[in-house]
Image (tube, rainbow, N blue to C red):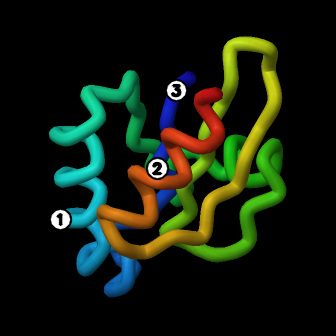
């Protein structure tokens, strides 16, 4: 499974969320990508994202999971639950 962070550098919530994302990545060693939707608005449209930060988990089968967790522990729990 891959983890995507959709964000905008001008978003104060995204700036606040970056340490949470960093801890999630460090803890899970997830394959991850950070996508600036201000530079890549087509990605936001593709995933139906209207607010940031948004985390999307992509399974190997192509299923998408939009995750609203905002703490490292909750993100990790969602990752583990959806990885099964």
Q: Residues within 10 Å of mark 3 (few under 14, many from 20)?
A: some
Residue topped by disc 2: 5
Residue at image location 52% in from the left, 26% down from the top: 2
Question: Which residue occupies 25% across, 65% down?
Answer: 20
Task: Give the mark nearer the N terminus: 1 vs 3.
Answer: 3
Look at the numbered discs 2 and 3 and tell me whether their residues touch, using CB distance below 8 Å.
no
Query: Of marks 1 and 2, which one's residue comes earlier in the chain?
Result: 2
For label 1, the residue is: 19
The 10 Å Cα crowd at callout 2, few under 14, some 14 to 19, many 20 or more, is many
Q: Secondary structure at mark 2?
A: strand
Residue 33 locus on image (x, y percent): 41, 33
Residue beneath label 3, please? 2
Q: In this image, 73 relative to 4: left or right?
A: left
Marks 1 and 3, how far apart at CA? 19 Å
* Image x and y of residue 10, in percent: 35, 76
- Which mark is nearer the camera, 2 or 3? 3
């Amino acid at each position: 499974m891959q983890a995507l962070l959709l964000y905008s550098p001008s978003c104060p919530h995204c700036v606040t969320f970056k340490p949470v994302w960093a801890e999630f990545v460090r803890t899970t060693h997830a394959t991850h990508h950070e996508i600036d939707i201000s530079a890549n608005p087509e990605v936001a449209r593709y995933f139906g994202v209207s607010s940031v930060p948004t985390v999307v988990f992509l399974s190997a089968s192509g299923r998408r999971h939009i995750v609203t967790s905002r703490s490292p522990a909750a993100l990790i729990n969602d990752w583990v639950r959806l990885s099964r």
